[in-house]
Image (cartoon, helix red, strand yellow):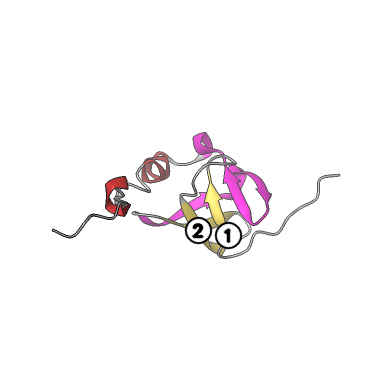
Amino acid sequence: MTKRVAIEVGWDVFVEDGATNFGTVRDIHSSYLVVFIEGHGDAVIDAKAVRDVHHQKVIVELEALAEEVQEAIGHAHDKETYEPEDDIPQPPS
């Protein structure tokens, strides 16, 4: 028998275990989740797309998601800018 794990608001959402999260669960319904996708906003994810739930993580099947949601996930971290050089202390000029 498979043990059901209750998903909770605030848990991170991923497309695969070990990947960077793309969003956070904001609301839970019997047939879908509302997930805040970084850089996009709220999106509805059908409960059938949930592949696994463990360690306060929700893993979804990317191909089972609507095309618009897949595209939003693909751009979830576009606005993050990080230049490794920014962390290197510079001598005073």
Q: Is residue 81 left or right of residue 45?
A: left
Q: Is residue 62 above or below residue 25?
A: above
Q: Name the residue at 34% across, 54% down.
A: 39
Q: What is the quadrant of residue 29 in the picture?
A: bottom right
Give 37 or 31, whichever is nearer the viewer.
37
Residue type, numbered disc 2: Thr
The image shows residue 8, relative to residue 86, as above or below, that is below
- Is the stretch drawn in magenta largely helix, strand or loop? strand
Residue occupied by mark 1: 11
Foreground pick, 87 / 65:
87
Instruction: Look at mark 2 in the image and give the residue it sits on.
Output: 24
- Quick one: 64 or 8, which is closer to the camera? 8
User: SS for tag 2?
Assistant: strand
Q: Secondary structure at mark 1?
A: loop
Q: Position of residue 71 (x, y in %)?
A: 37, 41
Q: Alpha-carbon neighbours of circle 1 within 10 Å: few (<14), some, or many (≥20)?
A: some
Residue 5 placed where, x, y %? 73, 55
Label 1 near label 2: C-beta < 8 Å? yes
The magenta segment is 40-64
First of labels 2, 1 by sequence position: 1
> Residue 42, located in which quarter of the rendered image?
bottom left
Q: Position of residue 28 (x, y in %)?
A: 58, 62
Binning the other alpha carbons within 10 Å of mark 2 as few (below 14), some (14 to 19) or many (20 upward) gives many
Q: Estimate the spatial distance between the alpha carbons at disc 2 and disc 1, rounded to whole Å.
A: 6 Å
Which amino acid lies under the numbered mark 1 shown in the image of this protein? Trp
The verdict on residue 88 being magenta is no
